[in-house]
Image: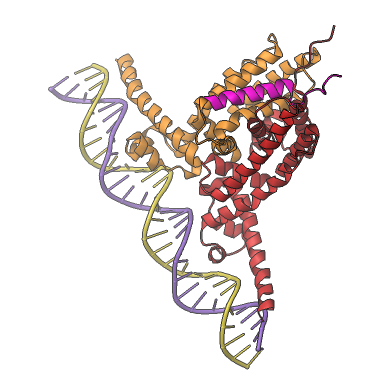
Chain colours: A red, B orange, C yellow, D purple
Amino acid sequence: MARTAEKLDEKIRARNIRIILDVATDVFSRKGFDGTRIAEIAELAELPKANIYYYFSSKEEIYSAIIARLISGWDDALANIRADREPAEAFRDYIRAKLDYTARHPRESRLFASEIIQGARFLSLKDRRHMQKATDERAAVIEGWIAQGRMAAVDPRHLFIMLWAATQFYSDFEPLACDALNRKKLTAKDFDAAAETIVRTILGGIILPPPSR
Amino acid sequence: MARTAEKLDEKIRARNIRIILDVATDVFSRKGFDGTRIAEIAELAELPKANIYYYFSSKEEIYSAIIARLISGWDDALANIRADREPAEAFRDYIRAKLDYTARHPRESRLFASEIIQGARFLSLKDRRHMQKATDERAAVIEGWIAQGRMAAVDPRHLFIMLWAATQFYSDFEPLACDALNRKKLTAKDFDAAAETIVRTILGGIILPPPSR
DNA sequence: ATGTAACCTGACCAAGTCGTCAATTTTTTA
DNA sequence: TAAAAAATTGACGACTTGGTCAGGTTACAT
């Protein structure tokens, strides 16, 4: 019967596709699109190379599948920027959520970064539009806060870029972050300190008012 | 005579090497190390491929030469962080200098970023130590400012990471920046607005004090 | 049991890759 | 101008790559 067939079908397909995407994420994030060999993905997935091509018709298809999968992850963090929230708390939660996500998914983060650096060749127009729309909406929220006098009048789009950049950095450029912090590897504590610094700097600035009197 | 020989030697050698490094920077920055074909470098340099190998013994040698060349560029921006300066002005000038450099050398910036993302495979230990030392020295300056009560007590190393990340972003992730700002291409005005936003946000924070009274 | 659809895979290919080399031309020196 | 040094280059070879395919096996419905 079709139902049972589909079920097993799902099981084997789903399992293999999951494994392939999983190890492919790892390799792509370390070697980039061109540096990645299908043979290496096959090896790590413990499948013959031809079997990879049974599920995916090309290297690009695997790559695109990974990108499409990870974009939605950022939406959750962005959801913190809502008009009905207190700006300070919204930004704090956003920064923490974004850092948390990037700390938990460094490979996806790096893969995406390397894709953008090389010109966003495989980032679908749909995904780009989705991200643009998300940015537009949050920018509107921030402009509302500014109009209400609850925030300084900064360009919300550049502000987003700043936050995105600061949070991504720790995963994307981990070797640089390690050097800057004198670490062999980044720990959860380092991500906490990063959140602390970013939140404090963004919210309050770093320059103290001159001593009163 | 040796002097004359060296002179012409310099001319032809220097010229070809300059051309090769120049076009190689372009290709490497767009395609990454593995994606770059020596044949393409040769074509753009208008030299036969074998001639490239007359000056460089491998693809890696070209790549490393480029990296070594660009690191010194950042030192100039960092020079703004000096103990004898007013913190606010020092940071403003640093941010502007860094953004200016990255706007003028986007290819080098991207090449470096892609090198780091892929694990800093070819970044020499010497270069890494150099960057670490530069960070250490500026961190000490900032700690001095904090001790003097001229700055909020933020972790200077995370602060540097923030500034580095925010300034690099516009070149490294230009497609994302374009999407976020609704642009086809970034202009000098956009870099000005970026500097304005970063400086204002970092220095003063974005949260206004509650209206007095 | 048996037919069928899904799944698996070793062997293969055409296209491209980096890097080499021997032979030639150009430039410099004496 | 002749010898030497530097620069140039077409052709080539060993190797790797993404992708194909025909023929096999496994899982399942009936």
Q: Quadrant of the C terminus of chain A?
A: top right
Asked whether A75 or B71 is in front, the reply is A75
Q: Residue furthest top?
A: A213
The image quarter in which residue B144 lies: top right
Q: Is residue A178 visible?
A: no
Q: Is residue B197 magenta?
A: yes
Asked whether A39 or B54 is in front, the reply is A39
Q: Is residue B136 magenta?
A: no
The image quarter in which residue C30 lies: top left
The picture places residue A158, in percent across and down from the top left corner, at 63, 31
Q: In the rendered image of this protein, does residue C11 appear above or below residue B170?
A: below
Asked whether B74 or B151 is in front, the reply is B151
Q: Is residue A136 left or right of residue B46?
A: right
Q: Please name the residue shown 66% across and 74% down the image.
A: A6
Report the number of numbered marks: 0
Q: Quadrant of the N terminus of chain A?
A: bottom right
Q: Please name the residue shown 56% across and 53% down the image.
A: A64
The picture places residue A175, in percent across and down from the top left corner, at 65, 35
Q: Is residue A99 visible?
A: yes
Q: Which residues are magenta?
A: B189-213
The picture places residue A2, in percent across and down from the top left corner, at 65, 79
Magenta highlight: main SS = helix
Q: In the rendered image of this protein, does residue A9 appear above or below residue B66?
A: below
Q: Is residue A182 left or right of residue B64?
A: right
The picture places residue A7, in percent across and down from the top left corner, at 69, 73
Q: Residue furthest right?
A: B213
